[in-house]
Image (tube, rainbow, N blue to C red):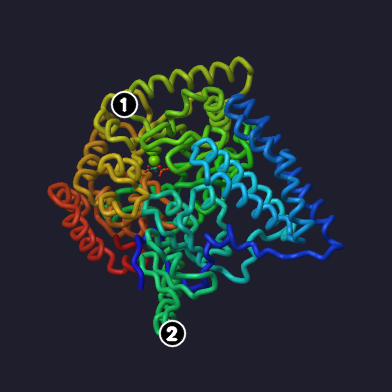
Amino acid sequence: MKKGVPVSPGVAVAHAYCVDEVITSHEPYTLDDAHLSAEVSRFERACAAVIRELDDTIARVTKQIGDEEAAIFRAHRQLLRDPTLLNKVKARICEKKLDAASSLRETLEEYAALFRQIPDEYLQERLADLRDVVGRVVVQLSRDEQPEKPLAFQEPVILIAPEIFPSQAALIDKRWIAGIITETGAATGHAAILARALGIPAVSGVRGILREVKTGDLVALDGREGHVYINPSTEVESAYRKLAREYVDFSHRLIENHEQEAISPDGVRVELLANVSGVADAQMAGQAGATGVGLYRTEYLFLTHPSVPDEEEQLAAYREVIEAAPNKLVTIRTLDLGGDKHVTYLGTRKEANPFMGFRSIRLASAYPEFFQAQLRAILRAGRYGQVSLMFPMISQLEEVQRIKRVVHRTKMSLQRSGIPFAENIPLGIMIEVPAAALCIDELLEEVDFVSIGSNDLIQYLMAADRDNPQVAHLCEPFSPALLRLLARVIRACQEHQKPVTLCGEMAGWPRCALALFGMGLRRLSMSCAAVPMIKELVRRTPLTQAEEIARRVLTMPTTGEIRGYLTRKVQEIWPNVALVDMRH
Ligand code: PEP
Ligand code: MG
């Protein structure tokens, strides 16, 4: 048994599919003489298709962001027109009678071997560009081999990968993925958040697993405990299959509360909202029993879109989410890119500390037109429901003042053009940088509401990367420092009579939700999968009891003591909670 970090609850038993192999395991095949010229044409068609994709990307990036930012794609396109490269690939197809994708890969390796001999950073970056382009052409070639299914699974698999980037996680098809195991990553990382949103059990931080498991091995995983078995004995296998059935049964029974209200036995209502990254989640939010969307992470539209979505495309996407959301109630967050979420068109600069670097709202001033296109789209979409506009990663008052001026100018320009928009859209900010939490009183003067992004707040408060399993113990929401800071922010919002939500992952963890309820929080936004669980907890917990628990917790000096105490208390209130909760 291997132990990792539990990141998404649920149990799965299925065959492994190792993602590391996808990149290298395209099985090379040889061709008959009669098919060689057809293979060369297929290669040429794939290159032409990728060039067309790049043309489109270049045009959009130039228009919406700037000419300079489009340079990278022009360089990629140039590579696909390089006769030396193309001739090398075609020669391999004809002389070695090798399929196009394998010929392309071999050619790439030839370049890589050459570049390795010259330790030059510039050349290494060009090699990265070449890999990127080769990847695009290989995908194009495989599309044409398997037009329907890019990965032809016979049955759902457990995906095993070194790490999963948010852009990849957003494309995961739940029908084929029974579970996810990664070598790195932690509970509040974005891949984990997406796994939870999809209801796929997942374990992160299982170091070295790719050396021990190969595609086709049977794997059992428990995302609540963080346990993984490779080729389990028949006893373990059947025990895990039973756990999987129990988990599914229990979750199904729990979701029957979706029409009930989240009201405590002493009559206090808690608003349970959903975190979504697209229309599928927004639809799920209603089914799970959420009463609205408390956080719409718009960056996934950009991460999964083949090139930059323009204002009209954004408007259509936002409108679709609003119309699918319960009560058409949606808080739309502006782009939160950077950190671990990248789009090539905003530059490929390397930063020593990307999470503390040029990310999120900080990008807005560098790309004003890009930012304004999003604001215009959100303001326009605001007419289709009860929509609020929220800005991430605020660190200081000046940022809020500047953004408000930009919003004002954007409204004026829409008005001048006679384009209808939501004139009174509420403006809010995320509190996820300790500096903002400390200056909460001044910030509240400027905004209509706040939402606490505890995932980032923990990592900045504890100076511990939220995605690094080696420091996961520091990133726990049971930290006395975090809880005391949260209590302070919640109190300030009550004093200023401004609505406050918490939309970090801890909102969906019963032990944390219990303490937050007791601290006075009445709005929690979480992954859809957690809504029935937190509703059950609220319906069982009198506020007076939660308040007493919160009071005790705020006097405790260690994370361990708080975790132990809340674990005991939640179990007293709801003995079956362990069936669905993760054990951190
Ligand atoms: C957070 O930081 O808590 C948050 C909700 O934002 P994200 O997880 O997208 O960074
Ligand atoms: Mg955040």
Give the amino acid type for the residue marked by disc 1 in the picture: Leu
Q: Residues within 10 Å of mark 1 (few under 14, many from 20)?
A: many
Q: Would you say residue 174 is visible in this rendering?
A: yes
Kindly state the secondary structure of the residue where label 2 is placed: helix
Residues under labels 1 and 2: Cα distance?
58 Å
Kindly state the secondary structure of the residue where label 1 is placed: helix
Residue 508 vs residue 59: left or right?
left
Q: Which residue is mark 1?
A: 443
Residue drawn at (54%, 31%), measured in percent from left and top? 378
Ligand 2 quarter of the rendering: top left
Q: Which residue is mark 2?
A: 234
Give the percent coordinates (x, y) of residue 121.
49, 37
Q: Nearer the viewer, residue 538 or 527?
A: 527
Q: Would you say residue 315 is visible in this rendering?
A: no
- Which disc number belongs to residue 7? none
Image: 493 above or below 92: above
Residue drawn at (49%, 35%), measured in percent from left and top? 335
